[in-house]
Amino acid sequence: MAVLVITAMIGGSAHVLVGDADPGAFVRFAAALARYAADGAGALTVGGLLYAVFIASARRDGVLKAEGYAGLRVACWAATAWLAAAGAMVVLDVSDSSGQPLSELDVPRLLAGVNALETPKAWLITAVLAFVLTVACRIVLTWLSCAVLAVIALVALLPPVVSGHAAVGAGHDIATDASIWHVTAAAAWVGTLVVVAVRRRKSTERMRKRFTVLSTVCFGVLAVSGVLEGLVLTPVSDILITRYGVLLLVKVALLAVLALFLRRALWVQVLVMAAGIGVSVGMARQPPSGFFREQTPMDTLIGYDISASPSVWDFVTAWRFSLIFGTAAIALAVAYLLGLRTLRRRGDSWPVGRTVAWLLGCLVLLLATSSGVGRYAPGVFSVHMVTHMVLNMLAPVLLVLGAPTTLALRALRPSREEPGPREWLLAVLHSRFARVLTNPLVACALLVGSYYALYLTGLFDQAVRWHWAHLLMNTHFLLVGYLFYWTVIGIDPGPRRPPYLGRLAMLFAVMPFHGFFGVIIMSSQGVIAENFYRSLAVPWIGDLLADQRLGGGIAWASGELPVLVVVIALLVQWSRSDERDARRHDRNPESDDELAAYNAMLSKLAKREQV
């Protein structure tokens, strides 16, 4: 509460610093209080769901046990509070950003403010998702449903984050990535911590071990991401002379206190975390010193400078590490190698080709998002198209051939008592959701329709301006590609796939649509996202339409190599399947004759019954 009072007292000076009108002390305090309530309720919603999914146990049939249901009930009430606080933030943020007291904010002005400002839109999205969680938490009772809701809750945390301080000015790509890691780790830790502290008398040794793993991982992510975000928004030289910098130091001090009590004194951790949320609210209401540096159009639009014309060598060496995809690529490679080490220690074998394919897929993901290709992709359409083609058509093929699910199922030991990671993975694989997504028609429609829906409807014109939208596009194309190629050449277990001839037909059915998309881009007479690219004004791109046509040519031609790899892999799998069937028949050559005789007998019996 003290932090909120201080925030309200200094909030007026923050408006003066950026040249905005001050809506008054009441709005400042109410906005700080509502933001604190929203952040706390959001974290508690995430924590309750993670407690039900990860900490507590479920029955073998997937239904939550009593302790998991207790976590779900916490999430239910927290989501209700989150909905109320996020809804209040829509109104208060319009008032605070526009400098209009609530008494002057009628409905037309409120709607105009929501339409014109980004942060009220973000809070509106959060409120809608909180409403979904409020309703769904009162309905679901299964582990898998709670896992889906936990993902939705984590996503609901992000709109205010990616539209806040981190999304503005030089380095905002790094700051946004860091803030995503920071907020998700903080919410997962503090929310679960509160539930564990309240339910500590019901906890078992296994539950305590799981929470220790969760808290340790979250602490590491929280510390690294917080430092990175702070250094981008406020240089070291400004830390002691700005309010934002002082609050950052207070937050670091609180993190140090947490490190001392990491595995003990749960309620001390809760109090420190509550103070940390208050400090974060204060930081969100103070402009960082980086806001007052001179910004170029490139700083504003993509976060860094790409005015120098790149050479081929620059695309290889001019790295700008993606904290989201670069970290994910490294983590996936390390996790795979750890699973492989587990098999080797048991004396089990694993095909070398699968390991090579997976590591190459991780390398391709890293290069596409963090090398010079990833650096220039946000500001150059042709390079952007290279990134999307690689993420959609090359990286997924290699990752699918790595058979990560099969490796995980072999490396993870079955749980004798309560369901564990292996059982969780099997529950996902055999879920109705997985069956729908792996339906050949759904997989084909997602792969083909994504490009047309994004680039030919005006959606890309709106998305290209935001770093978070680039993250979303890259994630979508990677997952859609993985889903499609898993259906065609997947080795991992899962819902039933079409026969090999049907898979080959799937592949050749989607390829013409992909080529036709490239032809449409090449023959287009208008520039996609023209306002953005003209505002960016990359000096070595003289003709935007020519660069766009180059991107269309890349889209048209880039499918050749991945398709060749897929066809070869599919034919090899088909041949091996036939060999296995032949060996099975050789071991029991009379099986087919016996089956035919058995079917004939059933046919005769059916005819007799009809007579």
Image (spheres, rainbow, N blue to C red):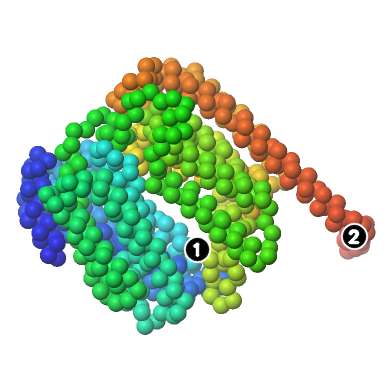
Q: Which residue is mark 2?
A: 588
Label 2, residues with CA under 10 Å away: few <14, some 14-19, many ≥20:
few
Residue 299 sits in quarter: top left
Residue 444 sits in quarter: top right
Residue 440 sits in quarter: top right
Residue 469 x, y percent position in the rendering: 37, 40
The residue shown at (42%, 57%) is 151
Pick the residue in front: 269 or 522: 269
Left or right? Give the position of 581 relative to 594: left
Pick the residue in front: 449 or 6: 6
Q: Give SS at disc 2.
A: loop
The residue shown at (59%, 56%) is 405
Residue 243 x, y percent position in the rendering: 13, 52
Residue 414 x, y percent position in the rendering: 60, 70
Position of residue 68 relative to residue 126, above or below, is below
Res. 259 mark: none
Q: Which residue is mark 1?
A: 144
Left or right? Give the position of 568 relative to 282: right
Position of residue 590 relative to residue 505, above or below, is below
The amino acid type found where label 1 is placed reads Leu
Pick the residue in front: 209 or 487: 209
Is tag 2's residue or tag 1's residue first in the polypeptide sequence?
1
The amino acid type found where label 2 is placed reads Asn
Locate the C terminus by quadrant.
bottom right
Asked if the residues shown at circle 2 and circle 1 are in contact, with their CB atoms under 8 angstroms apart, the answer is no
Label 1, residues with CA under 10 Å away: few <14, some 14-19, many ≥20:
many
Q: Is residue 77 visible?
A: no
The residue shown at (65%, 44%) is 488
Left or right? Give the position of 47 relative to 248: right
Residue 53 x, y percent position in the rendering: 45, 67
Q: Give SS at disc 1.
A: helix
The residue shown at (57%, 38%) is 394
